[in-house]
Image (cartoon, rainbow, N blue to C red):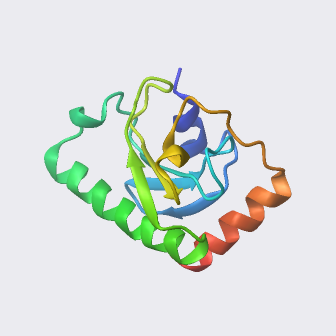
Amino acid sequence: MGTIFSKIVSGEIPCYKIAENDKFLAFLDVFPLVNGHVLVIPKVETDYLFDIEDQELAQMIVFAKKVSKAIKKSIPCKRIGVAVIGLEVPHAHIHLVPLNSVSDINFERPKLKPSANELATVAELIKNNF
């Protein structure tokens, strides 16, 4: 049985897709810390980020960099924060979080609950800047 992220990759579960290529997928976190919070995942299910082969990990970081630039163009913020926690879903992923203060990337604070329409609007905005 695959992870929720593998089910997103296969299309079993829909997502608010930002970008993808043959190896990676970027989509909105549906329970974001802040507006524009994006997840970047490898399409091949790998539990731990540092188990990914070096060349593919480097490609994933470059892909995430391109996504972060699109987020920065789309969401008013000072920077895009990067977090790798890896405890909540056993599928490697990078959090890209628009930051205006350090508390914006505090994973212990309550998550936002945007509507489907709000998520679709944000996804389209970021996608258009990718």
From the viewer's perspective, is 114 left or right of 4?
right
Q: Residue at x 77, y 42 (%)?
A: 113
The picture places residue 27, in percent across and down from the top left corner, at 57, 54
Residue 95 location (% of width, % of height): 46, 46
* Residue sitting farthest toward the top: 1
The correct choice, above or below, for 73 with respect to 60 in the image is below
Quadrant housing residue 90: top left
Q: Would you place residue 129 above or below residue 71 in this image?
A: below
Q: Is residue 9 left or right of residue 67?
A: right
Number of on-image labels = 0
Describe residue 28's horizontal placement relative to residue 3 as left or right: right
Whole-percent x, y for residue 63 in the image:
36, 63
Query: Which residue is depicted at the point 55% across and 79% down?
Result: 129
Where is residue 10? Give x, y as percent. 57, 43
The residue depicted at 46 percent of the width and 48 percent of the height is 102
Residue 39 or residue 43, whichever sits in front: 39
Whether residue 101 sits left or right of residue 31 in the image: it is left
Near-viewer residue (2 or 27): 27
Residue drawn where x is 68% and y is 37% of the image: 111
Residue 68 or residue 57, whichever sits in front: 68
